[in-house]
Image (cartoon, rainbow, N blue to C red):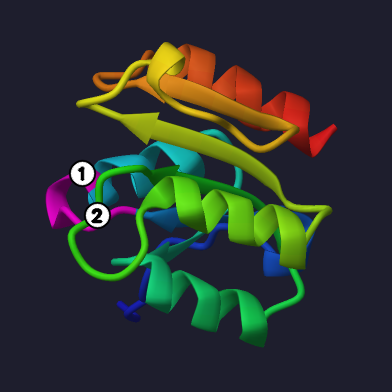
């Protein structure tokens, strides 16, 4: 028997890339699973600073999926505004377990989901954003 390593998910270039920004490791892992189950490639960041570094290094990110409430550096709303200014083509999904849609000012072409979010609705939003 040969070791086949991680399961083959096909060529990376055929799947659109979603940047998942979540400071809580378990929630980040669950969000990555959601993104991959929806057919996208997930790239992880533990905070906004790491997310910006990734965005500066990669040109293939199409969607950012971010939590609002992150303890280090800027929060997810400030990150969303920064992404809209610096990388306008990137679509944005914002989530929070502590805030509601009425409490926040989203950048254009962004969608908000309260935690716990409905996986089917988030998946549908990602697929719409990916066209």
Marker disc for residue 18: none
Q: What stretch is highlighted in magenta?
A: 22-27
* Secondary element type, mark 2: loop
Please state the horizontal and vertical placement of residue 44, each as a whole percent of the image.
40, 65
Which image quarter holds the N terminus?
bottom left
Give the vertical position of 112 relative to 21 (above or below): above
Percent from the top left, x then y, of residue 94? 47, 36
108 horizontally vs 126: left or right: right
| Residue shown at the point (34%, 16%) measured from the top left | 100
Front position in the image: 59 or 100: 100
Q: Measuring 51% from the left and 13% from the top, which residue is drawn there?
A: 121
Magenta stretch holds residue 24: yes
Q: What is the distance, in whole Å, between disc 2 and disc 1 at their CAs?
A: 12 Å
Is 18 in front, or is 33? Answer: 18
**Nearer the N terminus, badge 2 or badge 1?**
1
Let me know if residue 107 is in the magenta part: no
Local crowd size for mark 1, using a 10 Å CA cut-off: few (<14), some (14–19), many (≥20): few
Q: In this view, does 44 lie above or below 75?
A: below
Left or right position of 57 against 74: right
Seen at 65% across and 83% down, the residue is 56
- In front: 19, or 2? 19
Give the residue pinned by disc 2: 70
> In the picture, residue 116 is in which quadrant?
top left
Disc 2 packing (10 Å; few <14; some 14–19; many ≥20): some
SS assignment at label 1: helix
Can you say which quadrant of the picture contains the C terminus?
A: top right
* Rendering coords of residue 50 (x, y %): 40, 77
Q: Where is residue 79 in the image (x, y as percent from the top left)?
A: 50, 57
Q: Mark 1 points at which residue?
A: 27
The residue that appears at 62% across and 74% down in the rendered structure is 55
């Amino acid at each position: 028997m040969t070791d086949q390593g991680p399961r083959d998910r096909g060529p990376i270039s055929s799947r659109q890339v979603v940047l998942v920004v979540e400071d809580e490791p378990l929630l980040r892992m669950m969000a990555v699973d959601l993104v991959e189950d929806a057919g996208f490639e997930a790239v992880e960041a533990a905070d906004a600073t790491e997310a910006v570094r990734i965005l500066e290094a990669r040109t293939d990110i199409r969607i950012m999926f971010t939590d609002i409430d992150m303890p280090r550096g800027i929060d997810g709303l400030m990150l969303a505004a920064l992404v809209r200014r610096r990388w306008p083509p990137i679509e944005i999904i914002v989530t929070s377990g502590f805030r509601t849609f009425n409490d926040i000012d989203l950048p254009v072409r962004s969608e908000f989901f309260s935690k716990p979010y409905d996986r089917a609705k988030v998946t549908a939003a990602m697929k719409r954003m990916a066209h």
